[in-house]
Image: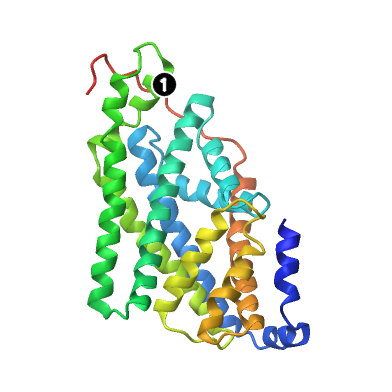
């Protein structure tokens, strides 16, 4: 599927024009964009730490950043970014129960990240659609953020009620009980979503700097629409690391801004190159430490009548 998608994208561009575009790259702008993107990924690793440490993974925040970049490395050769998420959960713990719990923290991290994507993209799209000013855009963004946080609150507030429906000896009871810190400390998810907005803004800035290296200068508000929408499409596991999806999405979304197919695909490929750089950092970290960490023992099962 990856080759098919890339074939469709490349069929719509002129090779000679594309090569001329690539010769105009200002690599200083590209390097600056890469630095911003890597910084955003470091923050993303710290966000994961804030969600994993309260449920029993009491490791230094730097270890989560380390494992986060390892996940990016494996995502280079696995479908979508989901494959990298599986690796992160596997590498964080050394037993099946702990890896399942680690998977829950990765899922919570992923969902808060998607919420940030949705809020940023939704506010930017509606701002353009309704011709809103700055304050109107902020009001719409605040409304979307409130909806996202409300959804998270409804889920985590139901955890204790779910426990009352599960018989005491059932292993699922002990597992769900470990997630109760999210219910007792709802600010964990709220903070994670707030950090997600910062991360997604950093991603948009990184791509805008890469585009500037090709002479494409657009308002940051445009990139706050384009980049989140492309990243949302890349989550769908239909290609390796979003190859083909990224390029096609950029060409489609930048066309109304007067950006030609050749320039749009060049921006996407330079963005992908930046992703490869981040992934290679993760690969180096994996080579330096190829063994999962030794996790602390599971906490005891919650007592009967919880909630």
Q: Nearer the viewer, residue 31 or 14?
A: 14
Where residue 78 appears, as percent x and y from the top left, is 66, 49
Where residue 34 appears, as percent x and y from the top left, is 54, 70
Its colouring scheme is rainbow
Q: Residues within 10 Å of mark 1 (few under 14, many from 20)?
A: few
In the displayed structure, 1 sits above or below 120; it is above
Measuring 58% from the left and 69% from the top, which residue is drawn there? 249
Q: Secondary structure at mark 1?
A: helix
Where residue 206 appears, as percent x and y from the top left, is 49, 72
Quarter occupied by the N terminus: bottom right
The mark total stands at: 1
Measuring 41% from the left and 60% from the top, which residue is drawn there? 117
Measuring 37% from the left and 20% from the top, which residue is drawn there? 173
Q: Which residue is mark 1?
A: 172
Q: Nearer the viewer, residue 96 or 277?
A: 96
In the displayed structure, 57 sits above or below 218; it is above
Question: Does residue 294 appear in this view?
Answer: no
In the displayed structure, 9 sits above or below 178; it is below
């Amino acid at each position: 599927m990856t080759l098919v998608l890339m074939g469709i994208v490349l069929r719509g561009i002129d090779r000679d024009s594309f090569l001329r575009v690539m010769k105009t790259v200002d690599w200083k702008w590209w390097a600056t964009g890469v630095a911003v993107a890597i910084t955003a990924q470091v923050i993303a690793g710290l966000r994961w730490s804030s969600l994993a440490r309260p449920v029993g993974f009491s490791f230094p925040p730097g270890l989560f950043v380390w494992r986060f970049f390892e996940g990016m490395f494996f995502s280079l050769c696995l479908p979508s970014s989901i494959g990298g998420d599986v690796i992160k959960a596997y590498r964080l713990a050394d037993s099946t129960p702990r890896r399942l719990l680690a998977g829950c923290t990765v899922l919570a991290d992923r969902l808060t990240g998607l919420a940030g994507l949705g809020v940023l993209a939704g506010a930017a799209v509606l701002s353009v659609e309704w011709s809103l000013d700055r304050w109107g855009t902020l009001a719409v963004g605040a409304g979307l953020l409130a909806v996202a946080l409300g959804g998270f609150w409804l889920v985590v507030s139901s955890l204790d009620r779910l426990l009352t429906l599960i018989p005491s000896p059932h292993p699922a009871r002990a597992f769900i009980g470990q997630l109760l810190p999210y219910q007792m400390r709802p600010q964990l998810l709220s903070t994670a979503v707030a950090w997600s907005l910062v991360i997604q803004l950093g991603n948009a800035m990184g791509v805008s700097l890469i585009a500037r290296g090709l002479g494409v200068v657009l308002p940051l508000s445009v990139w706050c629409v384009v980049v989140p929408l492309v990243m949302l499409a890349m989550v769908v596991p239909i290609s390796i690391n979003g190859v083909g999806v990224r390029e096609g999405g950029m060409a489609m979304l930048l066309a109304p801004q007067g950006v030609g197919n050749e320039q749009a695909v060049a921006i996407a490929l330079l963005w992908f190159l930046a992703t490869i750089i981040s992934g290679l950092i993760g690969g180096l970290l994996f080579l330096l430490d190829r063994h999962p960490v030794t996790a602390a023992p599971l906490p005891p099962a919650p007592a009967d009548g919880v909630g």
